[in-house]
Image (spheres, grey):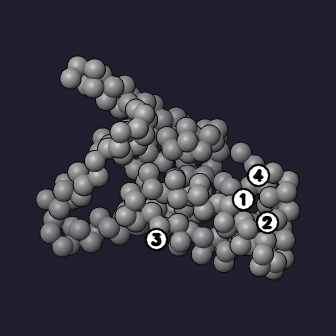
Amino acid sequence: MPISSDDARRVLRAQCGDRDALEAVLRSMQPALLRYVTRIVGATLADDVVQDTLIIVARKLNWLEEPRLFRAWAFRIASRVAFDYLRKARRELIHETGDAVLEALAAREPPPSEEALAALLTSERLSPASRAVLVLHFQEEMPLAEVAAVLELPLGTVKSRLAYGLKALRQQLGEKRSL
């Protein structure tokens, strides 16, 4: 979903050195990035990931050739930073105490009492990769082609991760009904 022409002009002004425009662009993206990143890395790391993402966006904004694609570009950066944080956290946990801590970490966040999709997005069953696809497609309302571009994945991979996530959702709903 490309940004509006007003937002594209603001990005252009930011690329030309307008600090107010840069601040406005970053502020406008922060809530959406925070929602997305929280679903990927959890609330504990989300603020750090978003802060690092916004710093990278500010530093590399001049590299963006098409200002209308700013939103997808920012989400791509957020995805990379989030997955880097997850890899780093996993390596640190393995070095500290091994697999028992990984299992405890996976169970640390209780699912919120929201709709079924929100519960699934916080579920241990769903990999961060599938969670990223579901969040971008359903919550950020991106078409699958744009999700593929953001995550730098083939469209077929995005579709299979979406199918896996929906299957996990159906299984979770089935378990709740049987209880």
Q: Amino acid at mark 1?
A: Phe
Q: Position of residue 13 (x, y in %)?
A: 84, 71
Kindly check if marks 4 and 1 are in contact, taking CB atoms under 8 A apart as contact. yes
Mark 3 — residue? 48
Q: Amino acid at mark 2?
A: Val
SS at badge 2 = helix
Mark 4 — residue? 3
- Tell me how far mark 2 sits from mark 3, CA to CA: 23 Å
How many marks do you count on the picture? 4
Please report the residue visible at 72 percent of the width from the left and 65 percent of the height from the top: 25
Q: Earlier in the sequence, mark 2 or mark 4?
A: 4
Q: Earlier in the sequence, mark 4 or mark 1?
A: 4
Q: Position of residue 15 (x, y in %)?
A: 80, 73
Kindly check if marks 3 and 1 are in contact, taking CB atoms under 8 A apart as contact. no
Please report the residue visible at 79 percent of the width from the left and 55 percent of the height from the top: 68
Quadrant in the rendering for residue 163: top left
Quadrant in the rendering for residue 57: bottom right
Please report the residue visible at 32 percent of the width from the left and 67 percent of the height from the top: 89
Mark 1 — residue? 70
Image side of residue 57 versus residue 16, left or right: left
For label 1, the crowd category at 10 Å Cα-Cα, with few meaning under 14, some 14 to 19 and many 20 or more, is many
- Tell me how far mark 4 sits from mark 3, CA to CA: 25 Å
Mark 2 — residue? 11
Image side of residue 100 versus residue 123, left or right: left
Kindly check if marks 2 and 4 are in contact, taking CB atoms under 8 A apart as contact. yes
Kindly check if marks 1 and 2 are in contact, taking CB atoms under 8 A apart as contact. yes
